[in-house]
Amino acid sequence: MAQVLEFKLPDLGEGLTEAEIVRWLVEVGDVVAIDQPVVEVETAKAMVEVPCPYGGVVTARFGEEGTELPVGAPLLTVAVGATEAPASSPANGGPAADEPSAGSGNVLVGYGTGAPAARRRRIRPERVGANAASAPAVPVAASASAPAPASAPAVAPASVPVSGRAPVAVGGVNGRQGPVAVVSPLVRRLAREHEIDLRELTGSGPDGLILRADVDSAIRRAGEAMEAEARTVAEPVAVQASTALAGAVAPAAERIPLRGVRGAVADKLSRSRTEIPDATCWVDADATELMAARAAMNAASGPSGGPKVSVLALLARICTAALARYPELNSTVDTAAREIVRLPGVHLGFAAQTERGLVVPVVRDAHTRNAESIGAEIARLTELARTGKLSPAQLTGGTFTLNNYGVFGVDGSTPIINHPEAAMLGVGRIMPKPWVHNGELAVRQVVQLSLTFDHRVCDGGTAGGFLRYVADCVEQPAVLLRTL
């Protein structure tokens, strides 16, 4: 006998409390194997494919694409033991058809599957009407108009929707009694927000199931009726004052939900500005020698001598050397204990612009790497960022951030510190400018460097010393050899 298990949105780690459904990877009626990805979700950190710890037949899905769910909310239900899925069949060492699968346990952070879920009580057909008023809310069943395949288990009687739960019963209207055929909480909320009486609707889904399209049609009809009534009332006034009314109706402003990556960036920057008393100092530096050193390094490696060293990698290596001299800037502030916490290692974040927004991947233990190693890790993390495959762990834990906004064709900026770090170095574009070199006016490759720092961890002397050391290394790369 099939047992229906409910799979909830697992804890995705790093303090994340919600995720948005981007794309369902399975349909109702599909057979899934243990640990098969079933949905792609987007958190404030990255896009993640969520694997299901159960093997069986999908009987219901909770939420449509674009819906935001909190951690612990139901994602889908799986009928275990009703079919021989490859990963859970007795032939493959899985549980027998009448035994619930214990699950693999190989899911994301904080979601245990070591013990099977409690067996659910099946609703008898003769009790649907009696128990409908107390039935719990049900998930959105994907492809409600498409019947489940023949191999799908008989999870619920024919009079109950595909999710296996009874619709909520309400009082009758105009002689209509019994439950309203709605299984989607989103459809109910949409109807409630627009004051649509579901008891007056006839569903277009299977067995009269009310779908979102039915509610949308009702909302549209109600809007058209209100507009027609408004036109009827306003017609005499419009004849008398048509000139005054011309152009009076302004287009509606577009509202964009502040969530996902954009919402996380907004929260973090707001917190940074609220909690951190920051200050910024900047300096122009002659990067001609640095560019020449980079060209010589890449030429020495030869055609097949490995990847080229980027300017960003060289600047990152300069930053790690500067932080070794000025460890105050590789710290954080414990406001509760009123203590400055100096961190033992440098985990260097770098700002990367992607289609999903600004993200800050972190190069772990950057203080132990040379320029080539840092460059290779930056290239790897940048590619993951562009494809949206960065894990939450790769986007957190930074101790200092390097922001190369020169790629956008700008010279300077006042960076906002990446909370809870203590400083950020900003780098503008490197471009030819007139410069006094060896007492003579010459055209040199000049760059502007900006340092924003937490004034609680140090004063201007320390920040100025850090920035001046970075500028000296840019102007004379040989200075960096002292620390190698």
Image (cartoon, rainbow, N blue to C red):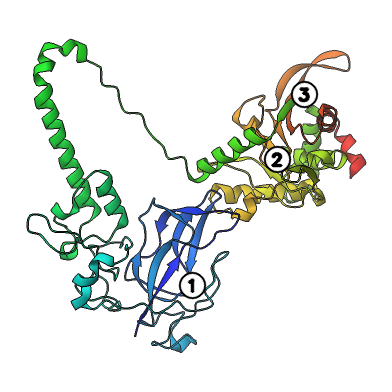
**Where residue 401 is drawn, which disc sits there?**
2
Distance from Cα at disc 3 to Cα at disc 2: 18 Å
Residue 86: percent from the left, percent from the top?
A: 43, 80
- Would you identify the image quadrant in which residue 461 lies? top right
User: Label 3 crowding class (10 Å Cα cut-off): few <14, some 14-19, many 20+?
Assistant: some
Residue type highlighted by circle 1? Pro
Task: Tell me which numbered mark, 1 or 3, is placed earlier along the sequence.
Answer: 1
Task: Tell me which numbered mark, 3 or 2, is placed earlier along the sequence.
Answer: 3
Q: Is residue 280 visible?
A: yes
Residue drawn 55% across and 71% down?
106
In the rendered structure, the answer to whether residue 483 lies left or right of residue 167 reads right
Residue type highlighted by circle 3? Val
Kindly check if marks 1 and 3 are in contact, taking CB atoms under 8 A apart as contact.
no
**Relative height, residue 209 to residue 119 (above, below):** above
Q: Which residue is mark 3?
A: 283
Residue drawn 81% across and 52% down?
368
In front of the other: 204 or 285: 204
Quadrant for the C terminus in the image: top right
Residue 99: percent from the left, percent from the top?
A: 42, 86
In front of the other: 36 or 64: 64
Quadrant for the N terminus in the image: bottom left
Q: Which residue is mark 1?
A: 53
In the rendered structure, the answer to whether residue 326 lies left or right of residue 303 reads right
